[in-house]
Image: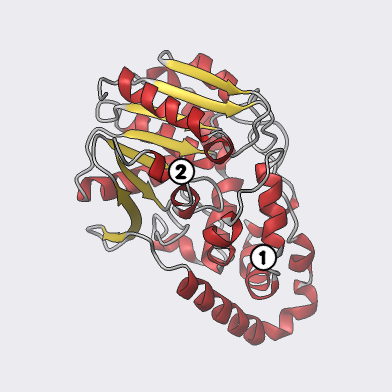
Amino acid sequence: MKVSATMITVGLSALALTGCAGIVDHRADRREAEAEAQYPPEGRIITLEDGRRVHAVTKGQGPDLILLHGASGNTRDFTFAFMDRLTDRYRVTAFDRPGLGWTDRAAPSLAGPFDKRAESPLQQAAMLQEAADAIGIADPVVLGHSYGGSVALAWGLLRPGETSALVVLAGASNPWPGGLGPYYTFTASSLGGAVVVPLITAFAPLNRAEDAVESIFAPQPVPEGYVDYVGAGLTLRRETLRANARQVNSLRPHVAEMSENYDRLPMPVEIVHGTADTIVPLAIHSEPLSRQIPEANLTRLDGVGHMPHHSAPEAVVDAIDRAASRAGLR
């Protein structure tokens, strides 16, 4: 996985501002409140038995289809334009993953600024499965994009007999060589979580989000209105930044362990990946995955980058329909 480190210069200024914690926290509080007022939950908040909250957006009628977003994302990535392509024949539910959007962390103890621990894909899948049970979702097709691909695979591993099919969309599924760069390493650390993350929340210019999004969509353009719709301010909240950084920074050993069990996945699996994806490279992730899962079918999208559900949505919809048909749902 390769990511942008556009905020690292802002973070390093912590050394000059350690005496201004009150100012930083006040400004961060204000910016978080503004973001939450501008981008409220789109759907319902499901309260689990232990009090944890999960945000879900549900539309349509038919067999259940679940959508799981990638790193730094939320349900808005799917509700922007993609979800409505499916609601005529599926009951589609998009979840905010733990710690992101409007969903709580998988465990309250993970929310401290000095705590470097993170939810594994298996822990995330288990929490979202509780929420799915609570709203009556049964035998779903589960689609996961990017980091969400690892959570979709974890979903199938946890419930092989209750998952109709999987769709892994540009998914992070296998260990990769090298590191993730200074941004994730530093913001996932105790020092970064306590000192640098509040500075990013307080002072990072929101217009820089467009540059980051452009790099994620490349070589395709960003759809008009997408940046304003998804809400960079939600991603830049302190707890969201910490959760995302720690999840991404700790992902590799989890997918390494999970990959040893992919051959046990009994359900149909459709894999869709762009050949021009430099964020989660095809050769490192989806090509090996297609050989690890007995019932996997890989679709390569020539020249498409990391966001196929926006850049080539018809191909992704076709993969969902194939998965549902192979599962006997259509």
Q: Is residue 15 above or below residue 279?
A: below
Q: Is residue 153 above or below residue 23?
A: above
Q: Amino acid at mark 2?
A: Phe
Write the residue at 46% across / 75% down.
37
Graded by Cα atoms within 10 Å as few (under 14), some (14 to 19) or many (20 or more), the crowding at tag 2 reads some
Q: Is residue 67 above or below residue 241?
A: above
Q: Earlier in the sequence, mark 2 or mark 1?
A: 2
The residue that disc 1 covers is 191
What x and y, as percent, mark residue 93?
A: 33, 46
Rendered image: mark on residue 82? 2
Q: Depth check: 64 or 253 in front?
A: 64
Q: Quadrant of the N terminus?
A: top right
Q: Depth check: 215 or 258 in front?
A: 215
Q: Amino acid at mark 1?
A: Leu
Give left or right: position of 187 versus 238: right
What x and y, as percent, mark residue 77?
A: 50, 50
Viewer-nearest of discs 2 and 1: 2
What x and y, as percent, mark residue 16?
A: 80, 78
SS assignment at label 2: loop
Please indicate, yes or no, whether residue 261 appears anywhere in the rendered image: no
Q: Is residue 124 above or below residue 288?
A: below
